Amino acid sequence: MASSSSSGLTFKLHPLVIVNISDHYTRVKSQMNPTLAPSHTNNAAAPNGGDGVVSTLPPRVYGCVIGVQKGRTVEIFNSFELLYDPSTHSLDRTFLEKKQELCLVFLSLSLSLALSLSNFLILC
């Protein structure tokens, strides 16, 4: 379990959270940047002028983390992805509301929003 301290707070991050975020990021990146099939009949360059891989900016993924805060210690032990629609620039609210039911199972848990991988912000 990773642990760090900032401004007197201690954060404990369970490995499952890191695996979940990594898995979600990898799936989104794979869906956004599919490898173009190589041509066996000619040696023409890829349509994008590259080596057969579509190059775009790294994807931004969204998700929630689940954890507890006891005093000055925040322990994050699970997470799940959120569905983001880039055409409307919004999250799927229905999907989030269904996932919030996870917190009802464990009443002592708080649901926090992680805005992105590059700007990992936790709102308690």
Image (cartoon, grey):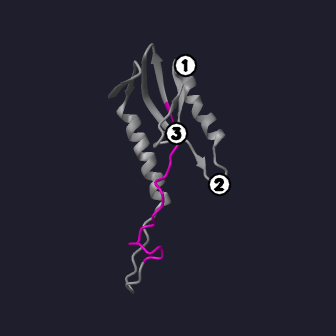
| Magenta residues (range) | 46-65
Q: Residue furthest top?
A: 71
Q: Is residue 89 above or below residue 11?
A: below
Q: Given contact means CB atoms under 8 Å apart, are the residues at marks 3 and 1 in contact?
A: no
Residue behind mark 1: 107
Overall secondary structure of the magenta section: loop
Q: Relative to the observer, which residue lies in front, 89 or 22?
A: 89
Q: Is residue 120 above or below residue 86?
A: above
Residue behind mark 2: 87
- Other-residue count near label 2 (Cα within 10 Å), few / some / many at <14 / 14–19 / ≥20: few
- Other-residue count near label 1 (Cα within 10 Å), few / some / many at <14 / 14–19 / ≥20: few
Rounded to the nearest angstrom, the CA distance separating label 3 from label 1 is 20 Å
Residue at image point 37% right, 30% down: 14
**Is residue 60 located in the magenta-colored stretch of the structure?**
yes
**Is residue 48 located in the magenta-colored stretch of the structure?**
yes
Q: Is residue 29 above or below residue 22?
A: below
Residue behind mark 3: 63
Looking at the rendered structure, the kind of residue marked 1 is Leu
